[in-house]
Image (cartoon, rainbow, N blue to C red):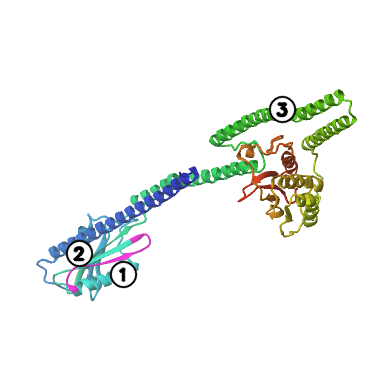
Amino acid sequence: MRSLRSRLLALWIMLVVSGAASGYLLFESFRQTSNARVARSEELVARACRDVADRYQFFVSGWGGGPINDRLRRDLITVVQTALSGAAGVEGGIWQADSGSLAYAFPSYEGTGPKTDLPAAEESTIREVNAEALRSGRPAVIRQAGRSQVLIVQACPLRGPLPGATAWTMTRTFTAEGPAYNQLLAGLAVLALTIFGSAAWLARVLVSWSRKIALIEEALGKGTSGATDLPTMPRTGEQELDRLVDALNLTGERLARERQRATAAERLAAVGRLSAGLAHEIRNPIAAMRLKAENALATNEDARKTKALEAILQQVGRLDALLRDLLAMTQGGEPKLADVELTPFLKNTIENHREVASAKGLSLKMADHEQYPPLPRFDRSQMQRALDNLILNAVQNTPAGGCVTVEALHQGEHLLLRVSDTGPGVGEDVRDRLFEPFVTARPDGTGLGLAIVREIARAHRGNARLAASPCGASFEIEVPWRPS
């Protein structure tokens, strides 16, 4: 599914593309309009040139010719003025190859007074187009495109008594001025204010939303690193996002309350299980001591009394060990962290159980491991107690001829202590409750050893677990390599 960010980005791209396309179409429309105006201007100067030729033809009909004098020039100027009087914006005249301009007129000139002087800037173009019309014997046209206008000059040959005479007309078509150009500018301005303004506004919204969503993601990411509750996020100032933030904050508060309730219920349940297990573990030794005491009172034989007292002392020792384990689990205390050399620490821990393992015909060894600087930090005595429980548990559950392996691994920022055996493994009936107090598969076990291991790992901000193993059982303690 597409995100809101990608949809807004697609909308922004569509706005930019549509704006560019609309601007291109407006420009093309203006250019076509300019081309149409140029075409109309060409038709206008061509018709005006024919009108000059017709008027000239009427003027010279029945005239046998004569010298070119001022009177003839005035008459020819009248001919041109009459022919161009209806052609707005068109100027023209009569040209002779030998004498140059014979007549010039611009009847629709909007300046002050009539314009009677031949435009000097265009004189070379006028000479060129008249020469071309005289040479070819048919009308000729020259177009000169400038930045803001197109100059159109047309010439057509004249028949009559004057040799080498041609008529010419000229006009200027402005391509960057006039109503069409103003409409183009207005259209582009409206386009820039609407489409491109909308695109700019949408880009700003997209960037703003992306930053605020990134802040929400960052806050949620920080809240999930080791925390159990959702973090309280500040409002963003965006109404839609703030509704989401308020909903998340409210959900976080509800989750925190429910977690507290669940934790309290779990604690009550754990206390109930602990009490039931403790009562069961204490009842059996008390019942055994009561039976032995009654037997001792009922007999007069010193040997039987001594045996009964020894049995009672044995049960007292069992109760004492049970209470010590229970206190170790519930009053572990804050770990006293210190740098520890792993190799001497593991060797010393293993040697404490070497004799017991040998008595059962087991092999107890330490796996090779690499020492990474700096040294790991943990409570030496607490961690040794946890490993003692795991090693003792492995020795007690592994048959003769088996092997118990202790190893330490440096995995990223964590220390992994693993105790593996080749015994029958852990049964499915106790696997899920293995680290709970008084859960054990051995008839003579108290079920507190693994619970103590878990509490020590948690005190070090780590965890204890039963790891997957191809054979036997493998227990792991994972704690930070150097807790901050």
Tell me residue 296's x, y (percent).
Answer: 86, 26
Which portion, as a residue range, is magenta?
136-149
Q: Decide whether residue 447 is among the magenta residues.
A: no
Q: Are marks 1 and 2 in contact (CB under 8 Å)?
A: no
Give the vertical position of 56 relative to 7 (above or below).
Answer: below
Identify residue for label 2.
75
Tell me the element at label 2.
Answer: helix
Residue 238: x %, y % from top left = 56, 37
Q: Residue furthest front?
A: 301
Q: Nearer the viewer, mark 1 or mark 3?
A: 3
Residue that badge 3 annotates: 276
Q: Is residue 164 above or below residue 92?
A: below
Camera sees residue 197: no
Numbered label attached to residue 123:
1
Name the residue at 27% across, 56% down: 36
Which of 95/406 is in front?
Answer: 406
Question: What amino acid is labelled 1 in the image?
Answer: Glu
SS assignment at label 1: helix
**Quadrant in the rendering for residue 220:** top right
Give the camera-side residue of 368 and 58: 368
Closest to the observer, 15 or 188: 15
Q: Are marks 1 and 3 in contact (CB under 8 Å)?
A: no
